[in-house]
Image (tube, coloured by chain):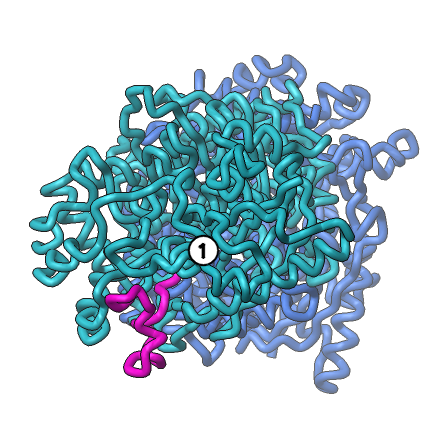
Chain colours: A blue, B cyan
Amino acid sequence: MAYTIGLDYGTNSVRCLIVDVTNGNELGTAVYEYETGEAGIILDPADHNLARQNPADYLKGIEAAVKAAITEAKDADKDFDTSRIIGIGIDTTGSTPIPVDKNGTPLSMSDEFKDNPSACAWLWKDHTGHAEAAELTELAEKEHPEYLAKCGGTYSSEWFFSKILHCLRTDPAVFDAAYSWVECCDYVPAVLTDTTKPDIIKRSRCAAGHKAMFNDQWGGLPAKDFLARLHPELGELRGRLYEKTYTVKTQAGKLTEQWAHKLGLPAGIPVAVGAFDAHLGAVGSGIAPGKLVKIIGTSTCDMLVAESSRQLPDIPGICGLVDGSILPGFFGLEAGQSAVGDIFNWFVNYIQPGGESAGSHEALTEKAAKLKPGQSGLLALDWNNGNRTILVDQRLTGLILGQTLHTSAHAIYRALIEATAFGGLTIINRFEEYGVRVSEVINCGGIAEKNPLLMQIYADVTDREMKISRSAQSCALGAGITGAVVAGAESGGYDDFADAQAAMCGMKDITYKPIPENHRVYQQLYALYKQLHDAFGLQGWSGKLANVMKDLLNIKDSVIS
Amino acid sequence: MAYTIGLDYGTNSVRCLIVDVTNGNELGTAVYEYETGEAGIILDPADHNLARQNPADYLKGIEAAVKAAITEAKDADKDFDTSRIIGIGIDTTGSTPIPVDKNGTPLSMSDEFKDNPSACAWLWKDHTGHAEAAELTELAEKEHPEYLAKCGGTYSSEWFFSKILHCLRTDPAVFDAAYSWVECCDYVPAVLTDTTKPDIIKRSRCAAGHKAMFNDQWGGLPAKDFLARLHPELGELRGRLYEKTYTVKTQAGKLTEQWAHKLGLPAGIPVAVGAFDAHLGAVGSGIAPGKLVKIIGTSTCDMLVAESSRQLPDIPGICGLVDGSILPGFFGLEAGQSAVGDIFNWFVNYIQPGGESAGSHEALTEKAAKLKPGQSGLLALDWNNGNRTILVDQRLTGLILGQTLHTSAHAIYRALIEATAFGGLTIINRFEEYGVRVSEVINCGGIAEKNPLLMQIYADVTDREMKISRSAQSCALGAGITGAVVAGAESGGYDDFADAQAAMCGMKDITYKPIPENHRVYQQLYALYKQLHDAFGLQGWSGKLANVMKDLLNIKDSVIS
């Protein structure tokens, strides 16, 4: 009997999961809500782009969540014994970089900068660096298009260098005081293993590859010259960042005596190098070649792996293609839809069809389920929050078409679900066009578990069976799996991920198989979706409607200002 | 002091208006709701295309409405004296043809056919003849394209011959028993003047020209050969229809002793030849060259006149171009939008945004008024019920574009209003492209009176002042004006329409002038609307999206059946 701990740092809280490595049983779980700011996020009423976090919350969270999970495990199984915990794994949001001093301590923990948001963690959804992102994209397009080819063609304001450059431009005191910057997923494992010093901290391949344009093809991070063109100081910083990165198969270090004591865990157990939540969520859902893991929440992450031994072309429009970012020995491929649950939430919360009682997700779903595919005559684009994959364009907007004088709210709700299914199929098709097969889809996230109609539509639209990951906390489970692998077989864990996943992952009994007659109708509807997708989304498309959504946003900007 | 009576036969009721010919003052008005069917319409639960009316209701309505209006007039003015009533005018819905016997009596009044809907009046919105309409259009396109050029290029299922041919195909007993078919607007004046016999009844130029392809250019009704190609019996019917038509300047006859006695009116006063409601509504709103009358209800009619002395080209996409159909001596031009009020009603009643309290027209309008033009980032097409002018295509559907995750219901409501304004501008532009100037817009109908936001948006979008017809019952007033003209100046009326309109029509004090800065934004938005309009609406458009809405409807039809 052996256990591992998975720590999953989300946007508002951290979850601890204690898992049995022999069968994936979840013995105890606990959540700690970050204390600082609103729901754990430091906001600025004057700038809706700003979203920061207090790194101290990450540390408080370890103690609170781990202890509570242990208590729960002991309650559940009186034979549970913390001495059987053999490893720890960690996933976090990202890119969430933190400016640190020479010891690797966040600047926000110093007296000098303690109330300064620039010295905090720059949460993934902080968009203050949007101008810097455009600048990075423009320069890379000209001088190093290969940098962008691995991350969808556009460098995002959510990513590492956009944020650091924005800090340099707007709060140089913080930038100057920062010896280095570390991702949240680097920082937490380093704290637990006393390896925070920037010269020894082990950096996540996942974070570096997907968000910092790190790739061995061009010698790691972007060239010093390139960064210096953006700002000389950014060029200088490169030498204080990193040359090498590590997959989750690597130990970040061993749990220190001090932390072992604090948490009631065995000292010296290995802690895995960290990774992003979606990536370890994919691991926890049993990702393997041919199996697309779809993490469905307000948005989706669509994760795939392909053997590193293959010659894989760059795939236009996907968010990232990084060797070892999900599983060692495999390219990790990340794609996603900018809004899925959020589109349904928009309709229910902003439009409130039929008022609060008639217009709940449940009520709309129940009525929508009675419609046949194609019966509503409606077609929608799933772009209310832009399009992440395959168009990589935040300045796209939603579209609903086919309304008559009798179109009902639940028909629109169904059309919105279908639109997200069509968007998902577009991602699958893109992968397959470039030789990455998708034979099966594993879904995780609350919507996948709660909405059979959505799952059936996804199966019917994609003509693929939809499975659902057994664990309701796939990210934390994936982190626990990395703990089992860094512990190794000799400690009761596993020597490789395939074995660990085989033992620890599972699917729910219920699956959704495509219904041929529905798929036939959806094939016709998808052809029309693709027509609209290309007409409004592709710049070079002959019909020249690609201006419409952008012109509207430009007009909107001009009349508001 | 002289008065006339205007009788306005609507879809659910008939209104009687007693009006002072010297100044247009409305002394008395009364409404009679038809008794038969649901809200006056005979429906068939098994066929939603069917909509018929009981002609007996039309006659009951005369007596009830005229008497009640007289009572009201007497209550309002003790000096009011029915002996001063000098003429009667009538407008009705159309095309609403009635099968009649040799005496001009509706077959539904015979014992043989009294319960047979085929023997009743075929209400304008009866669409049972949709297949026959397609057949008529196809044959005319091949053999007589000139027939269609005057009525927008497509013969509608709502029109005269579609209905008669459908009757011939589906209920030959009724067709065989019918000596002739008369429009409702021919029938009522004929009853009052004892001129119902098909060989003497005076047929309305308005009805014949707009709905029965009657034009002196080709010798009146469509050629016998043409009709016989559709069905030999239809060819035979032509000889029992009519060779000649009359404008509203003509007397249908004199009020009979019997009706005069029944109604308490002077016997022998003239009754004008009838016309359709929108056409006399235009007269009652003061239509004249350059003045577009926009009758805004669930749909709109957009009416113009142009001097008959002009060489007027056919104008593609407008519903009709008929010499004398509105005013004698002028071409009457009819265009329209298939849904205006109905689109707002759809959003409020079917989508019910925010529930019943928050989602009323008033509440949505109040919030929508706070938005600036362009601020919502939304753009919609006003095609929820197809597009009447200029695309003449019932198989087009609605579109809303530009939604984000924060788009509000009132922003959509405003976008729907704007869409109808853009649709209205497209009609104006079409008229002007063909040399028919629109310098001023006169609006009538409840929405125009009740919704200042809509009127201001219409002014801002079209860059034209929006005026509002003073009378709340412009159609009945227009009918009253025809009564004054057929009475003539020597009886205290008028010898021509210009004089009658000058005296009897008026505008409300409030008008809506275009706000230049709003218009500038709407010019940009209209360019985008026109892009979508052409992309989805024009078959020959290079972008080839014209299939999208139709394919969706075809898919819908295929999955429902």
Amino acid under disc 1: Thr
Is residue B97 in the magenta section?
no
Q: Is residue B16 at all visible to an observer of this figure?
A: yes
Which range is magenta?
Answer: B99-124
Q: Is residue A431 at all visible to an observer of this figure?
A: no
Could you tell me which quadrant the C terminus of chain A lies in? top right
Label 1 marks which chain's residue?
A: A
The secondary structure that most of the magenta stretch takes on is loop
Give the residue displayed 42% in from the left and 29% down from the top: B305
Q: Where does label 1 land, which residue? A: A404
- The picture places residue A457, in percent across and down from the top left corner, at 41, 66
Estimate how packed mark 1 is, as few (under 14), some (14 to 19) or many (20 or more) residues with alpha carbons within 10 Å.
many
Q: Is residue A302 left or right of residue A37?
A: left
Q: Is A1 located above or below residue A232 in the figure?
A: below
Give the residue displayed 74% in from the left and 68% down from the top: A30
Q: Secondary structure at mark 1?
A: loop
- The picture places residue B33, in percent across and down from the top left corner, at 56, 67
Is residue B108 in the magenta section?
yes
Q: Nearer the viewer, residue B446 or A350?
A: B446
Q: Nearer the viewer, residue B369 or A48?
A: B369
- The picture places residue A56, in percent across and down from the top left corner, at 82, 47
